[in-house]
Amino acid sequence: MLKTFIVFFFLFISSLGLYAQGIHSAINISGSLTNDQNKPVDYASVSLLRATDSTIVKGALSSETGSYIFENIKPGNYVIKVTSIGYIKGLSKTFNATGEVGTITLPTLIMHEASHSLQTVTITASKPLVEHQTDRVVMNVEGSILAAGNSAMDILQRAPGVSLDKDDNISLKGKQGVTVMINDKLTYLSADQLATLLRSTDGNTIQSIEIITSPSAKYDASGNSGIINIKLKHNKQSGTSGSVSLGAVKGAKFGDNTTITLNHKEGNLNVFGSFSHNDIIRVGDITLNRIINNDDGGSTFFDQDIHRQSNSHNNIYRFGADYETSQKNTIGFSLSGYNNSSKWRAANTTQIQSVKGIADSLVTTNSDNPNTYKNLAINLNDKLKIDTSGQELNIDLDYVKYNNNSFTQYNNNFFFANGSTQHPEQVLTNRSPSNIDIRTAKIDYAKPLNKTTKLEAGVKYSNVKSDNNLQAQILNNGGFINDTTQSNHFIYTEKITAGYVNLNKQLANTSVQLGLRSEYTQSSGNLIGRNTVNRHYIDFFPNVFINQTLNSKNEISLSYSRRIDRPEYADLNPFIYFLDPFTFRQGNAFLNPQYTDKYEASYTYNKSINVSLGYNHTSNVITGVVLTSGDKTFATDRNLNSYNVYNVDFNAPYTITRWWSGNVDFNGFYQEYKADTLAGSKVNTSKVAFEAKATETFLFDDFKGELTGSYNSASVSGVDHFKKYYGIDAGISRLFDHKKLNIKLSVSDIFNTRKFIVSSQLLSNYTFMQKYDTRVVRLTATYNFGNTKVKARQHRSGADDEAERAKSN
């Protein structure tokens, strides 16, 4: 039935395109803008005027290359008008758009710099919070009050369709398996390490967040629910310019953040860099209640209360340069990384009861966990414009290295119910150095075959090695000795060879993108001295995207894509990792990749209001489960047979008055997990759930206010059931010193309501509650200095598939 519907919909859209062509001939009008130095003029306001009465027909912004385009224009006589800060208004000569279907390319319009001062002119312009583009949704973070002082993780939670669970795993429209990229590059981190990075990334450095639910074949096939691309700010100035941001944070404890960005552009050389430092203290409480069924038919109750505090010191840096060797060729390099440290302290008290509410014994575990995280990423790139038609070649070479060191000491004490010592203290240590080396090479080629057809093709090779050496010791007679039963050395290697081809076709009112990507994977997981699991497999990932413009305000689209999620590196490590005397973490060397087929149909009104319907089928879905053996509980991962999601999404901006605007996002979905057998049980869980977010923006002269609310209903994830959670955030800002200085004050989770509650009764009977200090006050001051005319080149590197799966135990 579904396949029949897809075929019918494709035919329907094609017929609409043919029908529309029969009604009238639509024309595309394109052109470009340069200044007196023959440099592109970006983000200029371009208007298409009717020549007879100067009525505005359409408006647009010029791109970073100075180009613009107006689509689906009726035949007639027109004039192009251009305005941009720092330039005299530009007007083209009157031209005639004939009735022939195709694209009219106008002569380059030269913009002349204004010679008089603009100090007395005040122009206010801002992008909407959420923009719907052809293949993605863009959340414009730059300029938002709630971005100031917040981390990338805090901001990500407010993005349309995005949510987090108790372990900071990111979901998109109710589905996990999101690929997270920063400046078009994967982060090469697991969920917990990615959360550390995002929490240490200052929101002041973020320009926008792109949400791509149906990526083209050009992107790596990982990420079954899509891609989230976090775009960091790139300075736009010629000469020397930058910004300085200072912030203070008050939750349960005080924190601070500092960010400095600099950019220098002179002639053909552009040099850029940034540095961020923050000190973050997080305090949280966890309650874990478990019921263990005994062999005699009775039950034992384990009630745990855990208080945790982490002190993090984070330093993140970026540095790079681009050089135009000619008008057709640009070479560049970038160096980025971080040097972070943190220390977790946890106090864990476990009551063991044979009768609920009456303790038989008591166990306390105090743990200290200092960690260091270091990362270095180097990218070399070359962009060659082969000709003026748009034919170009991009080459990227990347090297990424992670050094993570974790040390934990557990002091376990055992008591009877009356408080007397049951047996001597047990002291354990785990030292877990983890090293990850990633090398990638990528070539992308693009060639316009004609004015309406473009071919893209490319190849990529990646080589990853993850080395995790867990060294356990136990205190014995006043000294620590190696515990070989709790130690292991796991080396994982993976090589992926990939190639893709994309074909883009633009008709009068219909655009079609067809793509195919193939990836050949070779992997080896070696638990030194114990066992080795080798794999090699080849996969094909097709994608189809069709967009039909019905008229100037209405368009519909349909897409299909196939995606893969490979297991995180450390999740393949089969050894058992100690958390407390009753709780352990265990990997699974036999985890298989999961595959997702994704279908989506959407309708967009006036480039702003969007409604979409989607269906996702995931086979071999990787799911976290909790299993019991005696009085011990093991957290691990298993493959379930399938996971199906049906979703409807609605997003719309609105304006109430001149000073009050907003945006609302609603995502409803039906989830369904199935497994024929899992630890002796059959899994068949389902749930109707929804997420809702709304942001209100208020503008008064130099003041700006924002109010954001979010609500997540109860949902399921595998065998786990999540309770509802919600919260409200607010902020206000004011501009000073000719809008160079911006002071922002914000409060997250005003009513302190955000907490996670998870329960399960299928494989294990447990309830988990986690509450961190989410009510946080932030005060941030940002000062911008320098010129504001020329934007630095933004570049996408080739290191963009292996990131999120790197993990150290």
Image: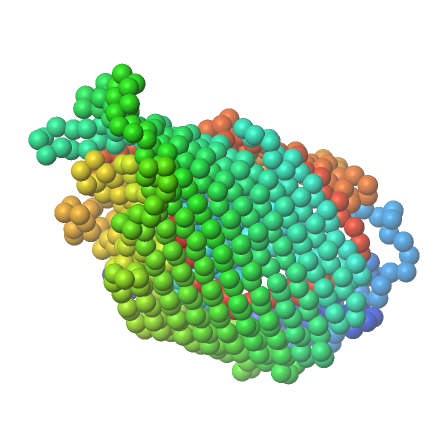
Where, by quadrant of the figure, is residue 288 drawn? top left
Q: Is residue 764 left or right of residue 724?
A: left
Quadrant in the picture for the N terminus: bottom left
Q: Residue 617, percent across and down?
A: 30, 57
Q: Is residue 328 above or below residue 658?
A: below
Q: Is residue 222 visible?
A: yes
Q: Residue at x 47, y 53 (%)?
A: 404
Q: Is residue 602 visible?
A: no
Farthest left residue in view:
296
Where, by quadrant of the figure, is residue 415 drawn? top left
Q: Is residue 620 left or right of residue 742?
A: left
Q: What is the image's colouring?
A: rainbow
Farthest front residue in view:
477
Q: Is residue 382 left or right of residue 627?
A: right
Q: Residue at x 13, y 32 (%)?
A: 294
Farthest right residue in view:
116
Q: Residue 431, percent across and down?
A: 41, 48
Q: Residue 563, percent across and down?
A: 37, 63
Q: Residue at x 16, y 28 (%)?
A: 299
